[in-house]
């Protein structure tokens, strides 16, 4: 992952658009806010989506996942979160904004 990209994104706040999500075994089933798409998220993507509360920065989400998955390298978690945030944004499930000071 490009470290410069993470530096730009780490203090941004992802916000849910209000899509519906439910857990289905190891996966999560999501419907975007338009009701136009049903998306299956893997376990990690579902966990990331649930951590998005309109308050936590990307860095704070990474920190929570680092605490939970202590055997995974920080750089791997950072990369996974950035990739997931980009994909959730492309699917119209979330948006990413600057943190209000």
Image (tube, rainbow, N blue to C red):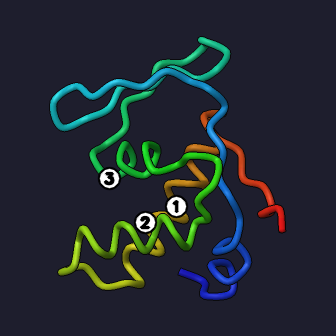
Above-or-below relation of 62 to 51 = below
Distance CA(mark 1)–CA(mark 2): 5 Å
Above-or-below relation of 1 to 28 = below
Distance CA(mark 3)–CA(mark 1): 11 Å
For the point 55% across and 18% down, which residue is it?
37
- The foreground one among 87 and 14 is 14
- What kind of element bears circle 1? helix
Answer yes or no: do the residues labelled 3 and 2 have beta carbons within 8 Å?
A: yes
**What residue is pinned by disc 2?**
80
Question: Mark 1 or mark 3, which is nearer the start of the sequence?
Answer: 3
Distance CA(mark 3)–CA(mark 2): 8 Å
**What residue is pinned by disc 3?**
44
Mark 2 neighbour class, 10 Å CA radius: few under 14, some 14 to 19, many 20 or more:
some
Q: Position of residue 95 (x, y in %)?
A: 71, 45
- What kind of element bears circle 2? helix
The disc at residue 83 is 1
Q: Position of residue 73 (x, y in %)?
A: 30, 85
């Amino acid at each position: 992952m490009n470290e410069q990209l993470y530096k730009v994104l780490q203090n941004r706040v992802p916000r849910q658009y209000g899509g519906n999500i439910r857990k289905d075994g190891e996966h999560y089933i999501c419907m975007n806010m338009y009701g136009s798409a049903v998306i299956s998220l893997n376990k990690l993507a579902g966990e990331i989506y649930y951590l998005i509360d309109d308050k936590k920065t990307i860095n704070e989400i990474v920190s929570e996942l680092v605490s939970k998955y202590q055997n995974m390298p920080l750089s791997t978690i950072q990369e996974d979160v950035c990739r997931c945030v980009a994909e959730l944004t492309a699917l119209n499930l979330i948006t990413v904004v600057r943190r209000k000071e």
